[in-house]
Amino acid sequence: MANHAETTTSGETQFQLLEHQVAGHGGVLRVGEGKVVAKPLIQREQQFYEASAQCAKFKAFIPEYYGTLQQQDGVAGDDSSSTADSSYICLENLTDGYEKPCILDVKIGTRIHDIDASPEKVAKMLGKAQETTTGSLGVRICGMSVQGTAGQARDWFAKLTVETIRDAFAMYFSAAESMVSVEYRRFVIRQFILEVEELAAVIRSVETRMYASSLLFVYDASRARYEQFISGAPRDNKSDCNDNEYDEDSEEDEGRDGLLDVKAIDFAHSHWVPGQGCDELYLFGLEKLVEILRGLLVEEPAASGE
């Protein structure tokens, strides 16, 4: 696989359609043993990843970027005939290493149209925002996959309202309780709150615009992995978002061998905008998301004997 920002051409590498994709456009591939995914290349997204490499505190909250790839072979499980000579960006697979991954894709921010969108596109996206929880909360669930439960069609998520979206979040965390324990559910939610709050602190300090970008949440609903985790040495929470205190190596070590992760993804409409201040519309969504997650802790039932 390529080093950072390097372009390679596939040869013997095997590709399969990514089985854990819960939202977004199709065509994301699992590369080789699965530690890397290949996503169809969009130049603006590639540029955003490459620019983000210059900001360590922000880079910690996005998938690792490995460069680009020219895929010239067929793809297992793909019935189309248009897979040859396609260009991809290569990213870390955020579900790699999880035994029973539970995945949630949440679009963040109240604006979903890009800076160069046509008037027709702007009108369409404004209408879509107002028809969904994007306009009111800056938070919209795009899809999820929960171990032990039947999946929901994507249009079901689009119909969620301010009143019902909390129930959908509760459904996402249900496997943590049903397959592990009430305490584990509480642990997962609290850790995600910390992660989102730390991301919000970073967003306040950088100058970006991330329109129609998502947060991807993953936790492992494996009792065995949780028991292994709690029987081991205690792990510290991530350090404050401060350039002077930031330790990139410890951040990476914690993220990959832990039980959960959350990263910002989908940057086809994202930009670094020096001199324009922080992204208030994205930040609004993060703050509302924290409110929702905190509400789940307040409303949770008392732990029963396990």
Image (cartoon, helix red, strand yellow):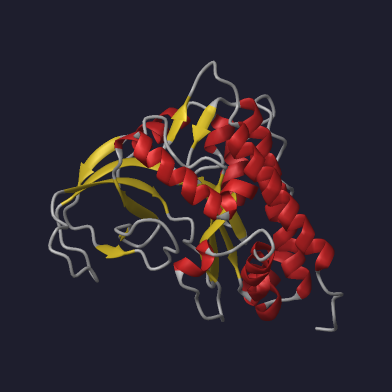
Q: Residue at x 17, y 57 (%)?
A: 83
Q: Can the viewer see residue 90?
A: yes
> Relative to the observer, which residue lies in front, 162 or 271?
162
The quarter of the displayed image where residue 30 is located: bottom left
Q: Residue furthest bottom?
A: 305
In this view, 141 is above or below 181: above
| 113 horizontally vs 46: left or right | right
Q: Residue at x 44, y 30 (%)?
A: 271
In this view, 6 is above or below 183: above
Residue 247 percent location from the top left of the image: 63, 34
| 130 horizontally vs 41: left or right | right
> Relative to the observer, which residue lies in front, 120 or 254?
120
| 11 horizontally vs 57: left or right | left
Quadrant where the C terminus is found in the figure: bottom right
Residue 124 percent location from the top left of the image: 41, 46
Q: Residue at x 54, y 15 (%)?
A: 275
In this view, 119 is above or below 20: above
The quarter of the displayed image where residue 301 is located: bottom right
> Relative to the observer, which residue lies in front, 115 or 1?
115
| 279 horizontally vs 45: left or right | right
Residue 235 percent location from the top left of the image: 73, 53
Q: Can the viewer see residue 53?
A: no
Could you tell me how many numbered marks the image carries? 0
Q: Residue at x 65, y 79 (%)?
A: 179
Residue 190 percent location from the top left of the image: 75, 56
